[in-house]
Amino acid sequence: MMGINDIQGTGGPVEVVGRSPWRLVRLAQWLSASFDRGREPEVKQENATALSKLDRWDYFRWVTQPLVNQQRLDELESLHRAVLRENPAHHAAKMDLGALLRNSGQAAAALELHLAAREELPEDPWPIWEMNADLEALGRIPEARKSADLLIAQLETLPMPLVTGLMDFLEKHRDRVRLERLLAGAQKRSEEHTS
């Protein structure tokens, strides 16, 4: 069933013309990570050094997501800070701590973290997306619209969750011009991928 949500049809029979080799790569990576699952360090502050060596997605999957799901948010904040003491450039801890702070009403502190991540990862759209959410939480909508422009400029490679989140943002703030640009770009992207 992996990737089944990528198929868009009208409810009738769907013919899959080609299969992306990347899906096989992603499946192999997922299987490999599943086998490695027992080898990740235990999620506690004493293991901050080992946790700081996890890559971004493993950190999110093995550290942030489980503690968020268990509503252990104070513990998670302390853990992010411990990991950042061990490795100040750990982008996952920086980004996830920022999101946690924003959701607890500390959007200004979150924006500082996401601005730093943006400087360190200039080609990555995720820090820009987080900045957009921070600016919106701070009521700085004109600046949030400028960050939306940065995301629209990366539309060709923008992950779909960011595309749909950006659509929601633009719709919520009645920004017809940017929304139409985004929709036109998304349609062009879709046509290119199906041809």
Image (cartoon, rainbow, N blue to C red):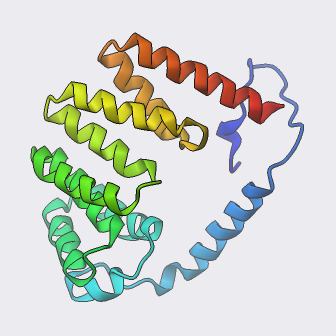
Q: Is residue 21 visible?
A: yes
Placement of 117 over or under 147, stated as above or below: below
Determine the image quadrant of residue 145.
Answer: top left
Q: Position of residue 93 (x, y in %)?
A: 29, 67
Q: Is residue 70 visible?
A: no
User: For this view, does 185 lie left or right of residue 48?
Assistant: right
Q: Position of residue 72 (x, y in %)?
A: 20, 62
Residue at position x 44%, y 37% from top? 151
Placement of 64 over or under 152, stated as above or below: below
User: For this view, does 112 lie left or right of residue 127?
Assistant: left
Given residues 158 and 18, the one toward you in this image is: 158
User: For this view, does 186 lie left or right of residue 151?
Assistant: right
Q: Position of residue 60 (x, y in %)?
A: 39, 64
Q: Position of residue 10 (x, y in %)?
A: 74, 17
Given residues 46 and 20, the one toward you in this image is: 20
In this rendering, the count of numbered labels is 0
Q: Quadrant of the C terminus?
A: top right
Residue at position x 47%, y 54% from top? 123
Given residues 84 and 104, the one toward you in this image is: 84
Determine the image quadrant of residue 94.
Answer: bottom left
Residue at position x 43%, y 13% from top? 177
Residue at position x 21%, y 88% from top? 46
